[in-house]
Amino acid sequence: MAQQMVTTKVIGLEKLSRSIGEDIPQEFKRMMFKIRGHAQKQAKERAKPHVGDVGSLANTIRGATVISRMTARIWTNLPVAVEAEQGRRPGNPPSSRALQRWMKRHGLAADWRSVRAVRKMIEARGTQGVRFMEGAGEDTRQHLPEFIAEAEAAIKRAWDKAA
């Protein structure tokens, strides 16, 4: 199956856990769930760029957080995800029926003559990718300092409270 994914990993947490003498702090766990949730939400929003999109791709985006490895990941197993993300290479047109359904959903003329013309254009030029996973990854990386600062502040409050 085709897999597009975004993975975020916090490095150095094992050392922090050893130095404070406890397991992974709850604040870091919450942070990892927030990071995964943010990335998943961004990917879903970006996978539906047009009003006519019915959300078939967005609804297949899943996420998982592995706290022991401090890893958050989102992915989709939908085979068309690779073409949606990266685009379609020239010489590889979609099926006429699938293209006709897509054209109808997007409010385009979907008679067979129009479908054939669009199919020939795609075969000649290919299509440009939506880059929904790439965009979600970039957006999440930009927000990482906020998530980390929030977790740091929560840990500091917990330490101050305990002291």
Image: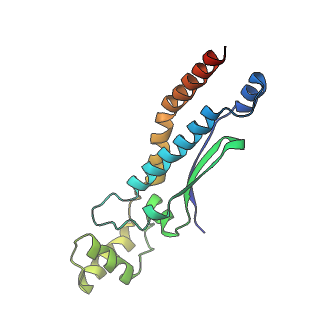
Q: Is residue 119 left or right of residue 138?
A: left
Task: Give me the residue at 50% from left, 47% from top.
Answer: 37
What count of labels does the image hold? 0
> Which residue extends farthest bottom?
112
Which percent across, then down, holds residue 46?
39, 53
Task: Say if 52 sits above or below 146 in the image.
Answer: below
Query: What residue sits 22% from the left and 73% below the top?
Result: 108
In this view, the residue in front, 156 or 52, is 156
Nearer to me, 81 or 126? 81
Residue 99 appears left or right of 87: left
Left or right of 92 in this view: 48: left
Q: Residue at x 46, y 47 (%)?
A: 136
Vertical relation: 4 (above or below) 96: above
The x and y percentages for residue 58 are: 43, 61
**Res 163 quadrant in image:** top right
- On screen, residue 95 above or below 153: below
User: Farthest residue toward the front?
Assistant: 162
Q: Most extreme residue toward the top, as rendered?
A: 163
- Residue at 70 percent across and 31 percent down: it is 13
Q: How is the image coloured?
A: rainbow
Q: Nearer the viewer, residue 67 or 47?
A: 67
Q: Choose top left, top right, bottom left or bottom right for residue 56.
A: bottom left
